[in-house]
Image (spheres, rainbow, N blue to C red):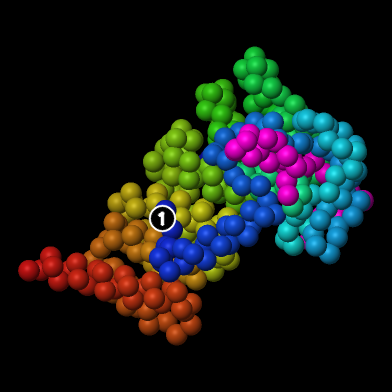
Amino acid sequence: MGWLNNRNGDRYLPVRAAGMVLFLSLLFSAAVHSRPELGPPSIKLRTNLSNIVVAELTDISAEHRLSFSVVENLHNEAEQSVVIRSDSLTSARLVEGKTYIIAYVGWDVDRFPRVTKPRRNGAVIINLDGAAPAIFQPNDDLVSLLRWDLKESLESPDEMLSVILRGMAESDPHLQSFFTTELVTRPGLHSRLTPTQKRTVAGYLVNSGYSPQGRSLMLGHVPFRDWLLEPEQQLEVARRVLEHHPIEIGFGSPYGGLVRSAMFIMQKSENLNDAVTAQRWLTSNQPALVESAAAVIYAVNPDILITALEQAAGYSLLEKQSRQALENLLQRYRRSVAVNRK
């Protein structure tokens, strides 16, 4: 299938882990502003309480506080100098003396009485789909989108589409994720893509060097995926993901979402070989992916599932949670077989 040659889910959440997940969520939100619902990030970043600036990073403190000297305001007026709380992962990727585009929130609104006031612990970087976190290298197309108001976007959709497609072709994965989210969440632009442009976008799905967040969103967003790819093309992309991606995936990695989306698609397959493709994921370090792989095998070729689970459970070097997931699955499916034989 020539289009593949273009430019190179359910979560497993034990009840006992829910408290830890809540704790981690609260801890993370202390340094990064929480996510709104999915939408174009160029719009979602602009609120009454947010600022978007072009600014030079002048200092990174030991507590991961970022000091900026504002060069230009893109949304709302900021102070000449701003200090923004960050986290160790983000601050380690930044360089003092460089200029960045950053979206942040420095204000809170009390409910009773409804009063706007500075955030108690200081400004924080916004974090949302396509901008996680919302700090970027300078980019003219990004600035253009951040200045584009809703009326202008409705009046010049072809120009906006050109800007988005140029952004998707950037080499920076963080920008790729931003512009991919823009395209996916603007359905009015989809019909304007030429066949060549559509093939290029589809090619990103099988490009291992493309943003994993962008690939995950395109493959997991059902309306966009169904518009972009025919059912057999979706299966071929899913196979490529499951065949070539390492089964060891770090906690919070965007590749987890990509693989789960591929697993969901593979459950629709009628090719018995796809059950074998999914089988290697039974020994993944991620219990959620172990369960997803079992669901694929059960949907495609249920006759081999118990044998596959027993074989995977016999591996000597398995993550404790993955082994537990396999044992739980074996008990579940053995009971199911026993009931069906009665």
The residue where tag 1 is placed is: 10
Q: Neighbour class for label 1 at 10 Å: few (<14), some, many (≥20)?
A: few
Task: Tell me where residue 79 appears, x and y as whole percent.
Answer: 87, 37
Task: Tell me where residue 339 appears, x and y as whole percent.
Answer: 13, 68
Question: Residue at 26% across / 74% down in the picture?
Answer: 331
Q: Residue furthest front?
A: 113
Instruction: Out of 58 and 310, give the one closest to the viewer.
Output: 58
Queried whether the magenta region covers residue 77, the answer comes back as no
Q: Residue furthest left?
A: 342
Queried whether the magenta region covers residue 103, the answer comes back as yes
Task: Tell me where residue 92 appears, x and y as whole percent.
Answer: 79, 61
Instruction: Out of 172 and 321, give the one closest to the viewer.
Output: 321
Question: Residue at 41% across / 77% down in the picture?
Answer: 323
Instruction: Out of 300 and 57, give the one closest to the viewer.
Output: 57
Q: Is residue 272 left or right of residue 319?
A: left
> Does residue 206 appear in the picture of this structure?
yes
Q: Is residue 1 left or right of residue 84?
A: left
For the residue marked with disc 1, what is the amino acid?
A: Asp
Task: Tell me where residue 204 appears, x and y as whole percent.
Answer: 59, 44
Q: Secondary structure at mark 1?
A: loop
Question: Residue at 53% across / 42% down in the picture?
Answer: 218
Q: Is residue 101 left or right of residue 323?
A: right
Picture quarter with the C terminus:
bottom left
Please identify the quarter of the rendering in which residue 53 is found. top right
Q: Is residue 336 above or below residue 102?
A: below
Please identify the quarter of the rendering in which residue 299 is found. bottom left
Q: Residues in magenta?
A: 92-120
Q: Is residue 313 above or below residue 116?
A: below
